[in-house]
Amino acid sequence: MSSSDTQFSIRAHFNYLQEQLFLFCDELKDSNILSATYYQLPIIQKELEEHAPEYINVEEITGRNAIDKIIYAYKDLFLDEKESGKVIQRHPGLICINDEQLSLQRRLKEVNKAKNDFKQAILSIENNDARFEAVHSAVPNLITLAAYRKIHSELAEPYSVRFTWMTKHATRTLSKEIALEMLNKSANYNNPRMIDQESWSSIVQNEKLRVTNLPDKSKLRIRRPTRVSPEVNVRFTAENRYHVSAALPFILFNPDKNTKLGRLKNYEKVENHPRKKEYNFLVDRIYLEKVSD
């Protein structure tokens, strides 16, 4: 497929996705909405995209204003030049809707299918650089991951729907040789941690020694913590529960009056969380650990 054909395919998939998304939002506005809550998070500016916050203030918005915010969230697919392009804005919220005819649910199913089809059209381009060029030529300023985001919902009658903050890890497996290459490169960094080059070289040499002493076939992994993100926890019983991303507002269809609805509270980093797993990193600085055989 030529580059022009690829761009045409991507644009066609996106146009259909946007068409279905706009129809969904119009139908949502006209639906029987029982309650709506949107949790406004601070806008992530470009200069702060590398900074993992230790505190996040949450502004709770309800009623008509929340509905407007929720609809905006579903349509928020393009980059504002002042905002971070690396860290996508998240839009946690909860909207409860009576949809006894299932019409809105059918539309939502089509929206999520269009999102997945758009994603697959992009991922069919094997080369990352070609993929980036094709997407942004076909749909300028699109936040690709925002377009991928599924709109999560629940039709059954859960015991509770609550919010929490989740810290995940980005993992990468690598060989002993690649780990040593990474450490060799970092030895040439200038004045890291505001210390002198000789002290820095000593730190890196000790790290390299630990890796060098491992058996050649050792399995290594980097488990780097990522930015904290909001999640929705849906519980039916103690054993039957699940959680999904709260990057977009969650929809509870035909809610039972006894379902307990939670709130998203401010985030504050806790250094010694009781559930925090302790990792015995081989190299703390890059979160490098040896994987048990």
Image: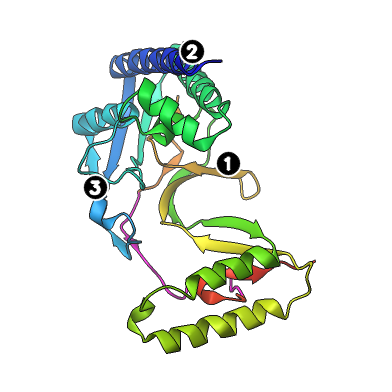
Residue under label 2: 5
Image quadrant assignment for residue 35: top left
Residue under label 3: 43
Report x, y in % for residue 288. Answer: 59, 69
Above or below, comparing residue 99 to residue 274 in the picture = above
Q: Is residue 257 left or right of residue 210?
A: left
Asked whether 170 or 124 is in front, the reply is 124
Residue under label 1: 236
The C terminus, quarter of image = bottom right
Could you tell which of marks 2 and 1 lies nearer the N-terminus? 2
SS label for mark 3: loop
Identify which residue is drawn at 43% across, 35% down: 145
The N terminus, quarter of image = top right
C-alpha separation, residue under disc 2 versus residue under disc 1: 47 Å
Q: Does the image show residue 276?
A: no
The three-letter amino acid code for the residue at tag 2 is Asp
* 269 inside magenta stretch: yes
